């Protein structure tokens, strides 16, 4: 009897809380009995037909196959036996050997791989108790141990592979196309891309090292090490494959290259931007994931109050965006949510009675009822030239994606002075650094402060995972270095995530926006024109009601929604 046939027989005799035999039979009819593919397809079908979450699925699968199921708390109580099965091998095979008193426990992520179970039995002379854990819980457990063991040299195994991507067509990718690709490089590249999208990553980093390829995802603004692939040959083949997908020059390895490609997953087109950079070892690749439909769904009905800003900050932003003319500057590092905030502001003020035009590099997401112009440097259409043309198109409100040079700054200021509302962004650390950036561009100070209505700086803070967040008390040294007195700490609700499958062992899940808004009044304008010190401008801003980023971050931490480490990572003590 086949492996899947045995499983179906077991399920047929299992109690009602087990997975139905018909579900396993359907999966077999659709894609055969490959163990790794079976688990992925089975979980997907269980979610679709039974509405089961990942952990409900693994519980019912354990009942079906008569395995004890371990959750994250159970895993943390185990003593890993990495002397019997090394950490890289455990990670590679997605299983764990552990000691529990005198017993050896084997925790499996895939109970259908009988060949692996036979191999594991040979690792210990003692009898084993077979247990089951969700693959995400195992991945989180390994992530917690990674830094201390400093060993992740096993070859990469994705959770699924995806089909080949041609140069001129958009291929539809799905789990059922896994077996169709015979090239290991194609499977590696596409499974990496597919898994990154499922994990909600914004970027994929493929870093070349003397020993091979390091795969990292940027999740919630932080790089997470996913896997290592040994061998320089693999590095070169992976980079070449991505160059083909992005229609770049394969033979050119000495200068940076930029490109794009598209993939379709479940009927949803996803854009990917590619940056290839030469290094002393080989070439590094960064792939930016632009999930247009994901943000389009957010933008439909998007409002500023959905972004998580405090009520005071929200009121300030709305007041600035509602002005009939002038300039609103939004600042922050790349990935801090500036674009989403400006889109939300435009969505709120777009009443159909005004002509709204944007110029962006590139136009990543489409806004209904808004004329959006993409920058095209190769054809000579930059921000400055595009902004001049926009002014002849009778706009009421203008969004300039970014101010990068003095010419664009001058035109934006003149636009704001001549009756247009201008929303734009600039890279700076806080609202006060923006003033220095513009003045160093050589703009006329009086014109600048006359046009400027206000400046907003924002950041995104990672939130504690709701599944594994627990109370804790930081040390006195941590509080002192963070500028928090013992008296203030007494009223704070310190929490942090322990790490679980839901957050992939990081302790964080999701992000929350914080902001500081400088609303210009006559006193502040006079100080800026007089070239007053930053300290005087800050004091006047505070008296005018400005709350700084650090204060907003401390409020979020005091409510138990993020950690002291996170606010120290994103903001600093002034």
Image (spheres, rainbow, N blue to C red):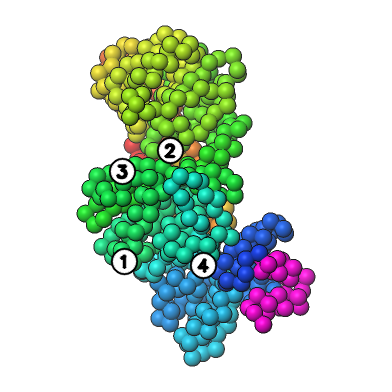
The x and y percentages for residue 301 are 62, 31
Q: Secondary structure at mark 3?
A: strand
Q: Where is residue 16, by image quadrant? A: bottom right
User: Quick check: is 14 in the magenta stretch?
Assistant: yes
The kind of secondary structure the magenta stretch mainly shows is helix
The x and y percentages for residue 485 are 40, 45
- Residues rendered magenta in the picture: 1-29
The vertical placement of 152 against 557, above or below, is below
Query: Of callouts 3 and 4, which one flags the residue occurring earlier in the amino acid sequence?
Result: 4
Query: Of callouts 2 and 4, which one flags the residue occurring earlier in the amino acid sequence?
Result: 4
The 10 Å Cα crowd at callout 1, few under 14, some 14 to 19, many 20 or more, is: some
- The residue drawn where x is 42% and y is 40% is 335
Q: Secondary structure at mark 2?
A: loop
Q: Which residue is mark 1?
A: 231
Residue 315 appears in view? no
Q: Which residue is mark 2?
A: 336
Q: Secondary structure at mark 4?
A: helix
Query: Of callouts 2 and 1, which one flags the residue occurring earlier in the amino acid sequence?
Result: 1
The answer for how far apart the CA atoms under marks 3 and 2 are is 25 Å
Quadrant housing the C terminus: top left
Q: Which residue is mark 4?
A: 138
Query: Of callouts 3 and 2, which one flags the residue occurring earlier in the amino acid sequence?
Result: 3
Q: Of the numbered discs in the image, which one, if any, rests on residue 257?
A: 3
Q: Are marks 1 and 4 in contact (CB under 8 Å)?
A: no
Query: Of callouts 3 and 1, which one flags the residue occurring earlier in the amino acid sequence?
Result: 1
Disc number lying in front (3 or 2): 3
Closest to the observer: 502 or 419? 419
Quadrant housing the N terminus: bottom right
Q: Are marks 2 and 1 in contact (CB under 8 Å)?
A: no
- The residue drawn where x is 48% and y is 87% is 122
């Amino acid at each position: 009897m086949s492996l899947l046939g045995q499983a179906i027989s077991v399920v047929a005799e299992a109690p009602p809380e087990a997975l139905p035999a018909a579900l396993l039979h359907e999966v077999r009819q659709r894609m055969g009995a490959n163990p790794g593919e079976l688990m992925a397809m089975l979980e997907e079908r269980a979610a679709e037909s039974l509405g089961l979450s990942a952990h409900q699925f693994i519980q019912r699968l354990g009942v079906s196959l008569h395995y004890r199921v371990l959750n994250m708390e159970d895993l943390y109580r185990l003593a890993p036996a990495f002397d019997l099965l090394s950490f890289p091998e455990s990670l590679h095979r997605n299983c764990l050997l552990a000691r529990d008193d005198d017993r050896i426990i084997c925790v499996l992520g895939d109970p259908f791989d009988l060949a692996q179970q036979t191999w594991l039995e040979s690792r210990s002379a003692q009898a084993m108790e077979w247990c089951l854990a969700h693959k995400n819980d195992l991945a989180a457990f390994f992530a917690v141990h990674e830094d201390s063991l400093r060993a992740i040299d096993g070859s990469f195994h994705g959770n699924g592979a995806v089909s080949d991507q041609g140069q001129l067509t958009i291929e539809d990718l799905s789990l059922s196309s896994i077996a169709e690709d015979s090239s290991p490089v194609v499977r590696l590249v596409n499974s990496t891309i597919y898994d990154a999208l499922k994990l909600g990553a914004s970027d994929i980093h493929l870093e070349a090292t003397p020993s091979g390829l390091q795969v990292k995802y940027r999740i919630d603004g932080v790089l997470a090490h996913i896997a290592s692939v040994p061998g320089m040959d693999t590095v070169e083949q992976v980079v070449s494959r991505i160059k083909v997908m992005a229609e770049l020059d394969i033979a050119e390895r000495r200068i940076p290259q930029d490109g794009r490609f598209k993939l379709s997953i479940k009927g949803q087109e996803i854009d990917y931007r590619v940056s290839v950079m030469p290094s002393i070892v080989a070439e590094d690749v960064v792939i930016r994931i632009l999930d247009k439909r994901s943000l389009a769904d957010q933008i439909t009905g998007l409002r500023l109050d959905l972004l998580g800003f405090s009520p005071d900050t929200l009121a300030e932003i709305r007041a600035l965006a509602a002005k009939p003319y002038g300039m609103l500057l939004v600042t922050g590092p790349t990935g801090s949510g500036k674009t989403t905030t400006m889109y939300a502001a435009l969505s709120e003020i777009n009443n159909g009675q005004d002509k709204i035009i944007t110029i962006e590099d590139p136009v990543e997401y489409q806004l209904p009822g808004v004329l959006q112009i993409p920058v095209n440097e190769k054809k000579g259409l930059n921000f400055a030239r595009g902004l001049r043309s926009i002014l002849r198109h009778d706009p009421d409100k203008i969004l300039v994606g970014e101010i990068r040079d003095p010419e664009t700054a001058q035109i934006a200021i003149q636009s704001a002075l001549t009756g247009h509302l201008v929303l734009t962004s600039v890279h700076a650390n806080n609202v006060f650094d923006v003033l220095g950036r513009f003045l160093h561009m050589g703009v006329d100070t009086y014109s600048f402060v006359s046009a400027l209505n206000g400046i907003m700086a924002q950041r995104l803070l990672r939130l504690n995972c709701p599944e594994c967040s627990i109370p804790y008390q930081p040390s006195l040294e941590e509080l002192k270095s963070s500028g928090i007195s013992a008296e203030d700490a007494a009223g704070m609700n310190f929490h942090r995530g322990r790490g679980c499958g839901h957050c992939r062992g990081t302790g964080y899940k999701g992000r929350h926006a914080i902001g500081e808004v400088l609303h210009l009044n006559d006193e502040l304008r006079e100080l800026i024109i007089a070239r007053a010190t930053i300290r005087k401008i800050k004091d006047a801003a505070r008296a005018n009601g400005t709350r700084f980023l650090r204060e907003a971050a401390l409020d979020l931490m005091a409510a138990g929604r993020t950690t002291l480490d996170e606010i120290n990572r994103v903001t600093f003590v002034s």
